[in-house]
Amino acid sequence: MITEMQVLERLKAVIATDLVGLQESEEGISIEHFDDKNIEIDFPDVDSMRRPTMLYIQPDYENLEPLGMNSDLATMRATIFLLCKSAPNAILVKRVFALYGALYLLVRGDPTLGGFIEDARITDMDYYPAVTASTTVTAIEASIDLQWSKEF
């Protein structure tokens, strides 16, 4: 049985591996180094960001629909927070949108996360020009639905 934590860990691994290669390369905007240390499965904490660019995956809720006698269709909603800091505001805006564009391409290009789940799709996005009264942190919040067959 594929568990919720396994799905979240797979999403984290796919993002860590593929996100940087999908972003538009613009001098001073694109992120050179991005790996699993830039991603946490947790609620974002701006004060404890380990790196200037972080991605947080927060599970929100799950819906289960019966598929058969021994399986359910699980749909988990999660929120992905993209946070950027430590640069001039004009660069932060471009950087966070470049990361969101790469995330969108990643999910659209591989909605099964390498065959691990049935489907993933970004459903909406919100932009925050300043986070926690700080003009030096810019963020995007994107909702993602992750769907898979839960065998038991």
Image (cartoon, grey):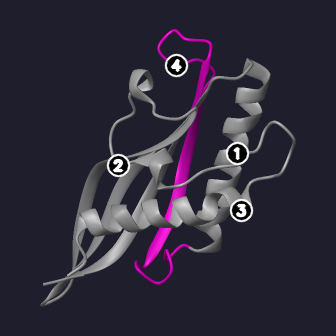
Q: Nearer the viewer, mark 4 or mark 3?
A: 3
Q: For the residues marked 1 and 4, what is the alpha-carbon distance in whole angstroms?
A: 20 Å
Answer with mark 1 or mark 2, whichever residue precedes in sequence.
1
Residue 75 in the image: state x and y as whole percent: 33, 65
Mark 2 = which residue?
41
Tell me the SS state at disc 3: helix
State the quadrant of the N terminus.
bottom left
Kind of residue at disc 4:
Val
Q: Nearer the viewer, mark 1 or mark 2?
A: 1
Q: Which stretch did the figure color magenta?
A: 111-140
Q: For the residues marked 3 and 1, what is the alpha-carbon distance in whole angstroms?
A: 10 Å
Residue 40 in the image: state x and y as whole percent: 39, 46
Q: For the residues marked 1 and 2, what is the alpha-carbon distance in whole angstroms?
A: 20 Å
Q: Nearer the viewer, residue 62 or 39?
A: 39
Answer with mark 3 or mark 1, whichever residue precedes in sequence.
3
Q: Is residue 125 left or right of residue 102?
A: left
Kind of residue at disc 1:
Ile
User: Which residue is at the far right?
Assistant: 27
Above or below, 104 relative to 18 = above
Mark 3 = which residue?
21
Mark 1 and 2 residues: CB-CB less than 8 Å, in contact? no
Q: Nearer the viewer, residue 64 or 53?
A: 53
Kind of residue at disc 3:
Gly
Answer with mark 2 or mark 3, whichever residue precedes in sequence.
3
Q: Residue at horizontal 44%, vertical 24%? A: 46
Residue 122 in the image: state x and y as whole percent: 54, 56
Mark 4 and 3 residues: CB-CB less than 8 Å, in contact? no
In which quadrant of the rendered view does residue 147 lie? bottom left
In which quadrant of the rendered view does residue 23 lie? bottom right
Disc 2 crowd, CA 10 A, few/some/many (<14, 14-19, 20+): some
Residue 52 in the image: state x and y as whole percent: 58, 32
Mark 4 = which residue?
131
